[in-house]
Amino acid sequence: MSFSKYLFTGFLVAIIFLAGFYLGHFLDLGKDAALLSPFGTIELEPKRPYQQYTIANLAKRRYTPSNITVEKVLEETDKITSFLFTYQSTNRKITGQLNIPKPLLAPTADQTTPTPVIIMLRGYVPVETYQTGIGTKNVAAILAENGYVTLAPDFLGFGESDPEPVDVWEARFIKPINVIELINSIKANPTLRPSLLSDHTVLLDAQNLGIWAHSNGGQVALTLLEILGEPIPTTLWAPVTSPFPYSVLFYSDENEDEGREARAWVALFEQDYDAREFSLTQYLNRLTGFIQIHHGAVDEAAPQTWSDEFVDKVETENKRRAVSKDIELSATDLTYFTYPRADHNLQPDWNTVVQRDLSFFDTHLRN
């Protein structure tokens, strides 16, 4: 056989091999398979399940509303009635405390005029000592006595809610999702039926909805505000506003191992993820609306310096918006109160803080 025939035969074999490889690849692996080279291997990117929880990706997520069901009476006073309520989020049941002003429950109450509603987000409470309403019920009672309907979710794993995810990162990252789906549930199904024995209803005003949050609840509130990019009037007590994951590590020295396990978890996390994509301080360009912050100077659980630095960052972002013609969001209208003697629960200035919150919500939720 001549040299030219050898060359032609080799060339033909190579073409058949390559065509067969790629045809077999597409037939066997399907249209979603990655294209691999027959001449070497390509190292595929590892699966990153938490990437769906970056603030940017959560802003693209579709949120599912559900019905809000009033289950039973928890407590009753002359001015308000507290109920246990349930709703569904991430295919799990979440319970919480619902406060309704007594006038709205009277047989002669107007059932056509909607009532402004405030969502209450608590801070950390040990699950062993938690009961529905802890961390929110005192402020919620004052707000309800002044005519607001309040809803305080227990969060997964607390109260009579379904268990939270066993994965510690997922359990953390889904909290803003759970609150957003509560907000969407109010918008989709604003009519509450407080009693199974009566057709009486209470209509919630989804267009005049506010958020009250304390401590780590403040971190959840700010994160969901950035995810939504909507101006929801929000007041924050001693919020956790330090960057992620420092906001996790700060509290880890209270553990028996003085934070060793927490540091190991964070180190593993940062091998595969950019922590900045999960940090609320990196997405202040998505924040807008009216926000009020209260912080005490002797707060040991969430240092006042966190709020000082957060307010400075918001003011810097507002200045950037003022000089840019390409930014559609209006400036964040932030009011910051500090209390020289106050602790993490704003004592001894609690009454002053509550009155300022009432004034804040009256201004922004009662049109």
Image (tube, rainbow, N blue to C red):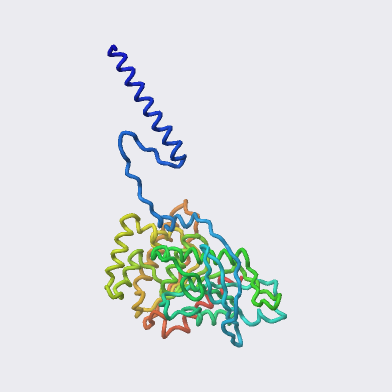
198 left or right, relative to 127: right
Which quarter of the picture shows residue 183? bottom right
366 left or right, relative to 251: right
View extreme (bottom): residue = 78
Q: Position of residue 347 (x, y in %)?
A: 41, 84
Q: Relative to 38, say whether 243 is above or below.
A: below
View extreme (top): residue = 2
Q: Residue at x 47, y 57 (%)?
A: 58
Q: Relative to 30, say whether 54 is above or below.
A: below
Q: Residue at x 61, y 80 (%)?
A: 101
Q: Position of residue 152 (x, y in %)?
A: 52, 74
Q: Is residue 9 visible?
A: yes
Which quarter of the picture shows residue 125? bottom left
118 left or right, relative to 7: right
Quadrant where the N terminus sits is top left
Quadrant where the C terminus sits is bottom right
